[in-house]
Image (cartoon, grey):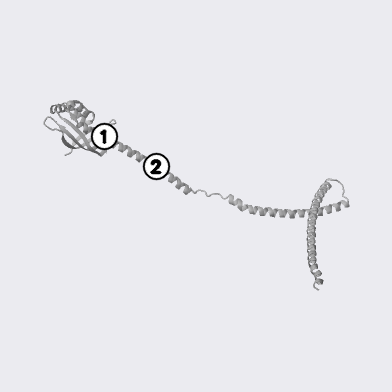
Amino acid sequence: MADAKEPPQDSAPSKADTMALIAEAEAEAAEAEALAAAARARARAARLRREAQAAAEAEQTAAEAPGEESPDTDEDAEEAATETAEATEDAGTEGEIADEAAAGAESEAEPARSRRRVPLPRLSVAWKAAVIALICAFVGASGFMVWHHHEATERNQRVANFIAGARQGVVNMFSMDFNRAREDVQRVIDSSTGQFRDDFQQRAKDFTTVVEQSKVVTQGTVNAAAVQSIEGDSALVLVAASSRISNAAGAKDEPRNWRLKVTVTDDGGQYKMSKLEFVP
């Protein structure tokens, strides 16, 4: 009994396979029909374009040719005109589709062009003026700093020159040796200027005689010096000095301390002692 029922079970797959094959064949047929319809549409469009072109040429020829036209010609012309209108309509539809596609592409490309063409913000007039003012201020500050540095350097150099002139004048004044009294006195004259030079030069002979007779030997040293004030080409220098004196009266390297006010004057680039005052 079981063996007798097996053939119907085998027939079920056969029916399914058959139906699948039929469906596949129908799909292929539908696809082929669609392809054929598309081909026919393309052929009809091509034919319409050719007929429209031929009709246009015929109308142009008829317009140029003299005489009356035959009824057949009129019918052909009407048919050609109808087909031309249809072809024109089809062409117009295709043109509209193309225009819509072009418009869509242009609308999509427009944001990109807009993004590319976004202009950079320009500097405002106020901002430019602020930048120029800042640059001018920086240049002015730099110039002032350079000028101030130059002035400070020049003043420091003048102060050093005044102090050097005071030191040299004091050392020459307090350094004497009776063995070379004339040379030492002349050195004091050479390192001085103004009224002090004139007064000392008038007493130079007497001063030399006193040094030689007293057998004076003295060596002066400047311990400290500082500029108190500067006025024009002259400066007042405070000097602390010391000396050791030996003479015929019995002094032997006796120390002496001195506090002095020395006026130093710039005499043609040479800083010389022009006044000497002892401070108690």
Nearer to me, 24 or 72: 24
Q: CA distance from mark 1 to mark 2?
A: 33 Å
**Residue 156 position within the rendered picture, expressed as x and y whole percent measured from the top left:** 30, 38
Query: Along the polypeptide, which appears first: circle 1 or circle 2?
Result: 2
Look at discs 1 and 2 and give the one toward the viewer: 1
Q: On the rendered image, what quadrant is the C terminus found in? A: top left
**Residue type indicated by callout 2:** Ser
Left or right: 77 with respect to 179? right
Quarter of the image for residue 217 reads top left
52 over 2 or under it: above or below = above
Res 233 visible: no
Residue holding disc 2: 142
Looking at the rendered structure, the secondary structure element under dot 1 is helix
**Residue 128 position within the rendered picture, expressed as x and y whole percent measured from the top left:** 47, 47
Q: Label 1 crowding class (10 Å Cα cut-off): few <14, some 14-19, many 20+? A: some
At a point 41% along the width and 42% down the height, the residue shown is: 139
Residue holding disc 1: 164
At a point 66% along the width and 54% down the height, the residue shown is: 104
